């Protein structure tokens, strides 16, 4: 039987919301991942960095930019022992500098995705998917990476209809 895993990287604390900074207790990507999970009932895994970025938004984006430029692979708190039992991975992340956060790269490089489908979704405040889909293809060796869904982060709580349409179009709902 086909099995799905929802994997996401998300950041709470101070975030950018359409021109203003706001503190949030649950990151936008985590909110959207939870809504997706309500629709598909998948197993879930949260990617967490052993040394998280700063809770201050402007410092965080500088740290993320440095990691990207240096090709750094942040150490993760944990990773699943295996993803062999899953044929579909719903992958959520915020757009960091036009692509996936480097913590997501760390996760992707841990596994062989041959024969698996990845459905990426990205939260952002207007920058869209950036190069994240092609970058996922580069790091998730063997995966069939489908067209992603761009979600406005400040409206993540209202993204369930868009998620449902996208998941239906990909045969998951």
Image (cartoon, helix red, strand yellow):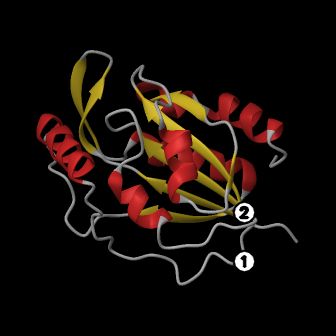
Observer-nearest residue: 149 or 97? 97
Check the image and name the residue furthest to the right: 1
Label 1's element? loop
How far apart are the two marked residues, 2 and 1, measured between alpha carbons?
A: 10 Å
> In the image, 165: left or right of 60?
right
Residue identified by numbered label 1: 85
* Quadrant holding the N terminus: bottom right
Label 2's element? loop
Residue 150 in picture, x, y percent from top left: 55, 29
Please tell me whether mark 2 or mark 1 is closer to you in this view.
2
Residue 50 in picture, x, y percent from top left: 25, 70
- Circle 2/circle 1 CB separation < 8 Å: no
Residue 164 in picture, x, y percent from top left: 73, 36
Q: Which mark is residue 116?
A: 2
Picture quarter containing residue 23? top left
Tally of numbered tags: 2
Q: Is residue 124 above or below residue 55?
A: above
Picture quarter containing residue 114? bottom right
Q: In this view, does 102 lie above or below 2?
A: above
Instruction: Give me the residue at 61% from left, 72% from top.
Output: 112
Instruction: Give me the residue at 48% from left, 44% from top.
Output: 31
Instruction: Give me the residue at 58% from left, 50% from top.
Output: 137
Q: Pointer 2: residues within 10 angstroms few (<14), some, or many (20+)?
A: many
Check the image and name the residue furthest to the top: 19
């Amino acid at each position: 039987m086909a099995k799905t895993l929802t994997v996401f990287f998300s950041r709470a604390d101070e975030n950018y919301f359409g021109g203003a900074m706001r503190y949030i207790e649950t990151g936008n990507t985590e909110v959207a991942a939870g809504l997706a999970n309500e629709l598909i009932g998948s197993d879930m895994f949260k990617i967490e960095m052993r040394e998280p970025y700063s809770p201050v938004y402007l410092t965080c984006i500088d740290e993320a930019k440095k990691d990207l430029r240096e090709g750094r692979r942040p150490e993760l708190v944990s990773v699943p022992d295996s993803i062999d039992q899953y044929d579909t991975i719903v992958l959520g992340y915020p757009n960091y500098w036009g692509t996936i956060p480097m913590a997501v790269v760390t996760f992707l490089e841990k596994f062989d995705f041959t024969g698996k489908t990845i459905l990426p979704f990205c939260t952002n405040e207007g920058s869209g998917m950036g190069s994240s889909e092609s970058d996922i293809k580069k790091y998730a060796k063997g995966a069939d990476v489908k067209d992603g869904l761009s979600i406005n982060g400040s409206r993540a709580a209202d993204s369930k209809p868009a998620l449902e349409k996208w998941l239906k179009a990909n045969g998951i709902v």
